[in-house]
Image: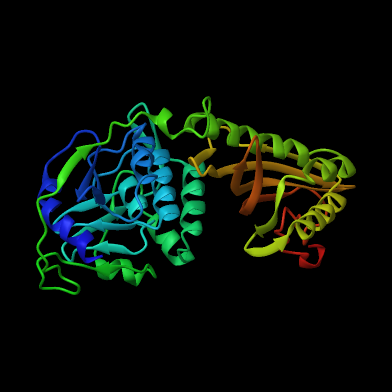
């Protein structure tokens, strides 16, 4: 960590320079990447640029100085940071807002200088120059923050500001919302200050061809992501089938051990849970909400994460319910097939459409009014 922060000390002055588009650069010592810098507006394509270098880097600090940008790109970068176990850092007198702040939250650990600030607001879409709150965008952000392990208090606080403003947090205010953060000043006067000397690092722009990350002659990262996206959509069609056929179709899509809504289960335990679900609800209709799917794949290891919102409707006799759920899948790609190693999610909207006013649907592993069903 000391060598990483020494690299940051040398490079930190460059973060103060204005940038109209995100510059993703690296700081190296002896040919080893120590720091990945993201400065400027985060734009489409930046997640792939980041992945190109992150996948070849074992340990690094991600230094951030940005007022935000594209939400999908930021979440993809954040997931990559968490997968790699990188730390994140906002340097002295710098700010990291909106999409940038979501990236910063993924760091392990999260670092910021005592004079740094991180800023948050609700997700939005731009309609003819008017910023309107995006309910689906906020749901995706909420799901992302949950996967990072943030408490509910923090999730609510970070998405409370309207899209026309930013709520700024000092290190103390970050901690006050239950978010772990380490204050690190690079002048040697604060906790963990860097005092060792370092050679002037070599800075290189990320320009690597994405095809070099493919797992086979015809498998670029984009190919693998498309396969993962199609797998997720196809899996939902399997869940919509008649009970016996549904069980047969999904019988080989799970790994031997699966993280199933927060609990480790065997494949047979997951299938038993699914059997109870399809028996309880013989009529099921589930589909991916258009525009909500986010896919990030780690190549060549070929582990993919799929995050989405699901529109669902279930019925059993006169009992009917419909709603929206978040959905998080982790997939392993071996040879020409995927297997599910983790699944999670949360019902975020429910509408009971029957006379059973005190009973909600047991959707996936969520059965708030009838826990015994699972």
The residue under the point 68% across, 37% down is: 287
Above or below — where is 205 with respect to 328?
Answer: above
Q: Position of residue 63 (x, y in %)?
A: 24, 52
The residue under the point 38% across, 43% down is: 74
Q: Position of residue 359 (x, y in %)?
A: 78, 60
Compared across the picture, whether 312 is left or right of 128 comes to: right
User: Toward the viewer: 20 or 126?
Assistant: 20
Above or below — where is 20 with respect to 264?
Answer: above
Compared across the picture, whether 100 is left or right of 205 comes to: right
Q: Position of residue 349 (x, y in %)?
A: 62, 50
Compared across the picture, whether 132 is left or right of 264 comes to: left
The residue under the point 36% across, 58% down is: 107
Compared across the picture, whether 43 is left or right of 261 comes to: left
User: Toward the viewer: 144 or 49?
Assistant: 49
User: Toward the viewer: 255 or 371?
Assistant: 255
The residue under the point 19% across, 59% down is: 116
């Amino acid at each position: 960590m000391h060598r990483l922060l020494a690299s940051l000390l040398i490079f930190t002055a460059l973060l103060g320079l204005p940038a109209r588009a995100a510059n993703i650069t690296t700081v190296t010592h002896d040919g080893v990447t120590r720091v990945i810098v993201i400065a400027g507006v985060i734009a489409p394509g930046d997640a792939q640029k980041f992945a190109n270098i992150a996948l070849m880097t074992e340990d690094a600090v991600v230094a951030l100085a940005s007022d935000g940008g594209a939400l999908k790109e930021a979440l993809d970068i954040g997931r990559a940071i968490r997968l790699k176990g990188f730390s994140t850092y906002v340097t002295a007198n710098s700010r990291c807002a909106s999409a940038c702040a979501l990236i910063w939250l993924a760091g392990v650990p999260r670092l910021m200088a005592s004079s740094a600030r991180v800023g948050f607001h609700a997700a939005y879409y731009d309609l003819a120059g008017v910023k309107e709150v995006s309910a689906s965008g906020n749901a995706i952000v909420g799901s992302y923050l949950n996967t990072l392990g943030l408490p509910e208090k923090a999730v609510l606080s970070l998405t409370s500001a309207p899209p026309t403003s930013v709520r700024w947090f000092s290190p103390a205010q970050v901690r006050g919302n239950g978010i772990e953060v380490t204050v690190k000043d690079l002048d040697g006067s604060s906790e963990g200050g860097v005092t060792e000397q370092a050679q002037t690092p070599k800075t290189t722009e990320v320009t690597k061809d994405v095809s070099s990350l493919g797992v086979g002659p015809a498998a670029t990262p984009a190919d693998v992501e498309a396969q993962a996206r199609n797998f997720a959509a196809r899996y939902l069609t399997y869940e919509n089938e008649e009970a016996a056929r549904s069980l047969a179709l999904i019988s080989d899509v799970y790994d031997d051990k699966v993280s199933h809504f927060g609990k480790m289960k065997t494949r047979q335990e997951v299938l038993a849970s699914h059997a109870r679900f399809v028996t309880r609800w013989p009529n099921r209709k589930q589909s991916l909400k258009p525009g909500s799917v986010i896919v990030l794949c780690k190549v060549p290891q070929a582990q993919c994460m799929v995050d989405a919102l699901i529109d669902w409707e279930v019925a059993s006799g006169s009992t009917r319910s419909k709603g929206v759920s978040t959905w998080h899948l982790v997939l392993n790609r071996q040879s020409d097939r995927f297997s599910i190693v983790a699944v999670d999610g949360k019902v975020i909207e429910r509408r009971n459409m029957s006379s059973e006013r005190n009973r909600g649907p047991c959707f996936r592993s969520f059965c708030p009014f009838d826990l015994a069903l699972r």
